[in-house]
Amino acid sequence: MQKIRPGYLEFPAFIALYLLFDWATYVDPLYGLNITPWNPDPALGLVFWLRYGWQAALPWCVALIGGELLVRGLPAGWALTLISSLWLTCGYGLLGTMLRRQFGDGGVFDSRDRLFRWVLIVVVGVLLNDLGYIALLWAGGLIPLGQWSEAVLRFGIGDVVGILVSMPLFWMLSSSSGRQRLFATVWRAETLGYLGLTIGVLFLVFGSIATSEFKHFYFLFLPVIWAAFRQGLYGTALMVFTLQAAIGALVKWNHAVDIAVHELQMLDAVLALVGFSIGIAVDELRKASNELKRTLRLAAAGEMAAALAHELNQPLTALGAYGKACELLLERGEGGAVLKGAIQRMIAESGRAADVVRRLRDFFRTGAIKLELLQMDQVVATVSQQFSGTMREHGVVLTVLPGPALAVQADRLQLELVLRNLLANAMEAVQEQPAGQRHVTLSVNQIAGQRRSRHGSMQLTVEDSGKGISAAQAMRLFEPFVSSKASGLGLGLVLSRAMMEAHGGTLWAEVAQHGIFRLALPLARADEQETGPAVQAPAQSAQIDDRRSGEQVNTQVNNAT
C-alpha cells in the first residue's frame, strides 16, 4: 500500500476523535483502567494506520496517553502509562502492518474471504496485544493475580468487539470514494425505516436496561438482516455501528453497571459478523449480476454483428451500383430523370442502412425492439436460403416443410438472428453423423391459443439428426456460459430466448433421441393484418431487386450512349 502524506490537521483531528470515542465508551471499566467491554477507538487507529503506516505511531501514542490523563485521571502513574502506551502503540502498529500487507490497496471487506482473514488477523493480534498489556498492569500492581483471567477477557472482548463492529464503517468514511458510496447506499427512505425499527427493537429487547436479561436479543437480527439484504455491506456497517452505539449509550447514561455488558457486546459482535457476511454475499451477488449483464451485452454485440453485416451488405452493394451508374452518367454528360432516379435510390438505401444501425444501437442501449408485421414463410425462406450453400458444402440436407401462411408482429432483425442461431446449432450438431445421415428440417405451424395469446400462436420447429438433448442437458441448456462447443460462450441460446420472451413468446428444447428446438410467438391479430400488407422479410429479394435496379440503371446509361 502506497504511503499517503497526511495534512496538517489530520493528526490533531485523529487525536481529538480518538479521545472522544475513548470518553464516550468508557463504560463499566475494570479497576478504573482502560479495560471496558467496547473499545471502538482502536478501530479508528487501525484505519489511520492503514492509510499512513508508521507515520500514525506518534499521534496514536499521544492519543493513548491523552486518554489515560484526561478520561481516566492517570490511574497507572506516568511511568507505567508511558510504557503501556508504547506497548499498545507497537502492538496495534504490528496488527495494522499485517493488515496492510494482507490487503494492500484493495478493499479490506470486498469479499467473504477477505472478511474472514480480517477477523482472524484481528482476533490473533488483539489476543497477543491483550496478554502483554495486562501483564504490564499486573506487574505494576494494578490488577490482582486472581483477576488476571477476567482482565484478559474484558480487555480482549472490548478491543475485538470495538474493531469488528466499528472498523468497517471507519474504513468506508476514510476515503472520498467510500464516503460517496456510503452516502449513495444509505441515503434512502428505507434507511430511516430500519433505523426506526432498531429503536423499537431495542426498547422491546431491553425495556429497562438495568434489569434486562437480554432474553429477546434475537429480535435485533431483524433490522440488521433488513439492512444487509437491501443495502449490502455499506448498509450493514452503518446498522451495526448505530446499534452498538445505542447499546453503549443506554448502558452509560443509565449507569447500568450490574449487567453483563461484556456478554452483551459479544452477542452484538456475532450479530455484526452475521450481518457483514450477508451484506458481502449480497454485494458479491449484485456484482456478479452486473458483470453477467455486461458480458451478455458483449455477447449480444457479437451475435448481432452477423445480422448487422448481413443487413448493411445489401444497401451498401446497391449504393455502390448506383454510384457507378451516376459516375457513368456524369462522364457522358447525362442528366434528367435517369440520374435523378439513381440519386433518389442512393438516398433511400443510405436511409435504410442508417435505420438498421439505429435500431441495433437502440437495442443494445435499452433493449428496444421495432415490431413489424412479418409473414413467417418469407422469414423462413430468407434465412434458409442463406444456409443452403453452407449446408450443401458440409453434406447437410436442409428441408423446409410447407406450412400455413402465418403473420406475426416481431422485430425482423432479432427474429432472423434467432432462426440463424438455431440453424447454425443444428448444422453443427449433425456433423457428428456419417455422410448421408445429416438432416435438418424446418417447419412452421399454428398451435391453439395459450395464456399469452388468445388468438393462437405460431410454432417454428428446427429438428436435426444429431444425438439430441438429454434431460440433464435440458435443465441447464439455457443457462449462461453452459455450452457443448469447445469455443462457445454458451450465450447464443440465452440471448435467443431473451429476445423471444421480449416478443411475448418463448424458446425451448425437447428431450429426444434427436435435436428438437421449438420457438413460439403470438400470431398477429386480425385487425393488425387488415391495416396493411405484411412487411416482407426481403433479405434475398431485396438484394435481387437492388441488383435489377442497378442493372436497369446501367442498361439505361448504355442505351443513352
Image (cartoon, rainbow, N blue to C red):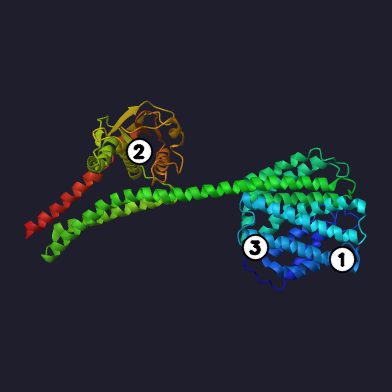
Residue 406, picture quadrant = top left
Residue that badge 3 annotates: 175
Q: Which mark is nearer the camera, 2 or 1?
A: 1
CB-based contact (under 8 Å), mark 2 and mark 1: no
x, y (%) of residue 171?
A: 68, 59
Instruction: Please tell me how many numbered marks the rendered image carries.
Output: 3
Q: Residues within 10 Å of mark 1 (few under 14, many from 20)?
A: some
Q: In this rendering, would 129 be left or right of 177?
A: right
Residue 368 seen in the figure = yes
Residue that badge 2 annotates: 409
User: 2 above or below 520?
Assistant: below
CB-based contact (under 8 Å), mark 3 and mark 2: no
Q: Which mark is nearer the camera, 3 or 2?
A: 3
Residue that badge 1 annotates: 81
Question: Which of the marked residues, 1 or 3, is nearer the chain's N terminus?
Answer: 1
Q: In this rendering, would 181 be left or right of 354?
A: right
Residue drawn at the location 80% of the way across and 40% of the way down = 205
Residue drawn at the location 44% of the way across and 29% of the way down = 451
Of the 4 image quadrants, the one containing the N terminus is: bottom right
Q: Indicate which disc residue 241 carries.
A: none
Q: Amino acid at mark 3?
A: Ser
Residue at the bottom extreme of this rendering: 8
Question: Which of the marked residues, 3 or 2, is nearer the chain's N terminus?
Answer: 3
x, y (%) of residue 219?
A: 75, 39
Residue drawn at the location 52% of the way across and 47% of the way down = 289
User: 245 above or below 73?
Assistant: above
Q: In this rendering, would 522 be left or right of 183?
A: left
User: 16 above or below 477?
Assistant: below
Residue drawn at the location 41% of the way across and 49% of the way down = 299
Q: Amino acid at mark 2?
A: Gln
Q: Residues within 10 Å of mark 2 (few under 14, many from 20)?
A: many
